Image (spheres, grey):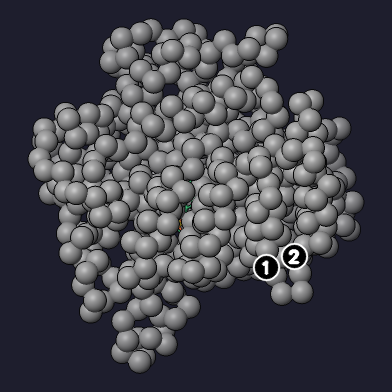
Amino acid sequence: MTAELSRNERIKEASDYLRGTLAEGLREEITGAIIEDDAQLVKFHGMYLQDDRDLRGERTRKKMEKAFAFMIRVRISGGVLTPKQWLALDRVAADYGNGTVRITTRQSIQLHGIIKSNLKTTLQAIDDVLMSSIAACGDVNRNVMCNPNPYQSRAHAAALELTRMISDHLEPRTPAYREIWLDGERIVGGEEEVVEPIYGKTYLPRKFKVVVAVPPSNDVDIFAHDLGFIAILDDNGNVLGWNITVGGGMGMTHGEPDTYPRTADVLGFCVTRDVLAFAEAVVTVQRDWGDRANRKHARLKYTIDDRGLDAFRDEVEHRAGVKLKPARPFAFTSTGDRYGWTDGEDGRSHLTLYVENGRVKNVPDGVQLASGLRRIAETHDGDFRLTPNQNVIIANIAKHNRASVAQLAAEHGFAAPASGLRRNALACVALPTCGLALAESERYLPDLLAELERRLAVHGLTDEDIVIRMTGCPNGCARPYLAEVGLVGKGPGRYNLYLGAAFDGTRMSKLYAEDLDHAAIVAALDPVLAAYAAERQKGERLGDFVIRAGFVAATTSGRDFHANAGAQRVA
Ligand code: HEM
Ligand code: SF4
């Protein structure tokens, strides 16, 4: 018996390659929204229909429509953009958005608060600087991430080149984006193979995420993604090829143990010329094998758990027409960013700046990040690199510009984070824009960090690098299950606390305590930190310590994520 297709499958099928009735809906002035089916399709164009949840109550009382606006996510392969592109995004955020640019945990930029009547103008301004938002959301391959290290190493250059190749290869071919947003001519008809040779009419069962990593940095969090490539180098730093990883994913639903986060498996090794064939094969196997009936079971991670890694590998090799070689050894050391200045041997310098929760704004009487970056972009002739930790690198600064960038950074109050915990903190957007948020995240994490920093100081742990991540719901946009301390929204003001992930991003955490409010989070963490300070071994990371000390058991697989047998100690 075949299960009935999910509603989204029918919407895709009937959409004529993602057109739906979007063009008509945009002209409809009576509402700030679009119809439900089009709201699903617009994601493939890089947009989400949202409403300001802070205003919901008041507007309902006044019998007004919700305060609808769109979030636009821009496609930025490897997170690299030119100063001109930075300035253009900064400008549209000011002119049409909520005045802030948000650097995301997947190296793209989101603009929030764009009303329907400004969508086309905004997308045209983005197109003017050769960028687009196509496939930034939706059941397709999204933004491809890459270690953003700008130091002039051959491996990093090769990784960025590979990232762009994969992104181009897996970009949807439908002319719908151009037609609808950029007033392109309607291109009629076309056979399925011609319009979307890789995806076909119904695209993928669910979102698909690809990353490229260059060890020892695992800043892209390769094990959280559907498909990954790990650079394998020879002794001289030349790329020999790539280990392929498959089947990572973060999302789950509270109380539904059949849904779980999962770390990716290493599938094998391939040389550079075979990367596109393997990437395409992994995508098409998931296209054909993925679950199109149940969207909560549709990611590649479930396909692999259901069919088995060996069967999946056989099919991928068959479709790619090449055999994978055994995976080569590799070692990651961390997922974090290195803040501050680095000076390359080629005379170019790089400045990694801390951006709290990725939100580029001016704080009244505080850091003037938005203005400072704008001033720097006006004269900078290198590039801007967004990191997977929501930070920005002013990269490839020419010698003659270094002093002026340093001066602008100082003038605008740019400062390194005050503790090792803050250095390694991530929060998803959550309220007020995200329709799925059950609790605050971006607006709350800084206050929690301030409280925890007081405790860290007491325990002598201020400078210790500890990875903490928060999300407003279990979907996991800030990858909380790969943080040594993970907090996941359960309801207003309440969070589940996860502990025990590896510092280098190779092992997930486990549930430690449920339904905690602010005071309870601090009360739960304080004794764990105290024990860590007192009992840790030399160089031992918090995520490893909590397992050795018996606070939580180690997670070994996705299916094992919800079982917490093995923990003996409660703080
Ligand atoms: C069922 C799973 C998921 C759903 C339905 C979902 C949905 C959403 C929505 C609605 C937003 C927009 C929030 C806003 O800007 O107001 C968002 C943001 C985002 N999501 Fe997800 N998400 C899911 C899982 C994930 C996962 C697992 C990742 C990464 C590994 C991810 C990466 C992001 C990123 C990078 C953003 C941008 C904002 C940020 O950096 O926090 N999402 N997601
Ligand atoms: S984790 Fe949940 S609350 Fe946070 S942005 Fe993603 S979907 Fe929204």
Is the residue marked 1 within 8 Å of ligand 1, measured from its CB? no
Query: Is 324 left, or right, of 156 in this rendering?
Result: left
The quarter of the picture where the N terminus appears is top left
Front position in the image: 22 or 106: 22
Residue density around tag 2, few if under 14, some if 14–19, many if 20 or more, within 10 Å: some
Which residue is at a point 49% across and 43% down the rendered structure image?
A: 76
Would you identify the image quadrant in which residue 216 lies? top right
- Figure label count: 2
Left or right of 36: which side holds 144?
Answer: right
- Amino acid beneath label 1: Asn
The label shown at residue 17 is: none
Left/right placement of residue 466 relative to residue 156 reads right
Indicate which disc, 2 or 1, sits on the residue closer to the N terminus.
Answer: 1
For label 1, the residue is: 362
**Contact check, label 2 and label 1, Cβ < 8 Å:** yes
Q: Is residue 19 above or below residue 143?
A: below
Residue matched to label 2? 367
Taking depth in this image into account, of 401 and 568 the one nearest to the observer is 401
Q: Kindly state the secondary structure of the residue where label 2 is placed.
A: loop
Residue 382's spot in the image, x, y percent?
Answer: 66, 40
- How far from the left and from the top, in percent, is residue 316? 33, 17
Q: Which of 569/302 is in front?
A: 302
Q: What residue type is labelled 2?
A: Val
Residue 490, relative to residue 302: is it above or below? below
Residue furthest bottom in the image: 62
Q: Which residue is drawn at 68% across and 63% down?
A: 371
How many residues crowd around disc 1 within 10 Å: few (fewer than 14), some, or many (20 or more)? some
Alpha carbon distance from label 2 to label 1:
6 Å
Looking at the rendered structure, the secondary structure element under dot 1 is: loop
Give the residue displayed 48% in from the left and 11% down from the top: 271
Relative to residue 476, is residue 361 drawn left or right?
Answer: right
Q: Is residue 400 above or below residue 30?
A: above
